[in-house]
Image (tube, rainbow, N blue to C red):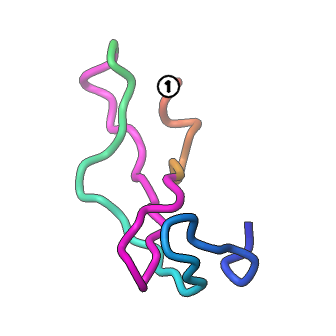
Amino acid sequence: MNSKEMKCKSCGGNSFVQAMDFINLRPVDKKMTLGSERIFTVCLKCGEVVSIKVKNPEKLIK
């Protein structure tokens, strides 16, 4: 989804920023796997996280 088409469900804002977390997402049964970063799309008006995406989903099955 293009950020220009997005609208925050909480406040109606239409300005967003993408941010990453320091801790990778990894499968529960594979604790030694590096996993993948998460990308959060955050509303700049109210701070609501409107989207969470895994950067490299293929790393979750390796």
Q: Residue furthest top?
A: 29
Where is 9 relative to 14, above or below?
Answer: above
How many numbered marks are there? Answer: 1
Where is 40 relative to 42, above or below?
Answer: above
Where is 9 relative to 26, above or below?
Answer: below
Label 1 crowding class (10 Å Cα cut-off): few <14, some 14-19, many 20+? few
Residue behind mark 1: 62
Which residue is painted at 36% across and 39% down in the image?
25
Which residue is painted at 38% across and 77% down in the image?
46
| Percent of width and height locating residue 49 | 43, 62
Quadrant showing the N terminus: bottom right
Which residue is painted at 64% across and 74% down in the image?
7
| Percent of width and height locating residue 42 | 44, 71
Residue 11 within the segment the image draws in magenta: no
In depth, the one of 35 and 10 nearer the eye is: 10
| Percent of width and height locating residue 62 | 50, 25
Which residue is painted at 25% across and 22% down in the image?
31
Where is 1 relative to 55, above or below?
Answer: below
Give the magenta range: 30-52
| Percent of width and height locating residue 23 | 24, 49
In depth, the one of 49 and 40 nearer the eye is: 49
- Amino acid residing under circle 1: Lys
In depth, the one of 1 and 46 nearer the eye is: 46
In depth, the one of 14 and 17 nearer the eye is: 14
Residue 34 within the segment the image draws in magenta: yes
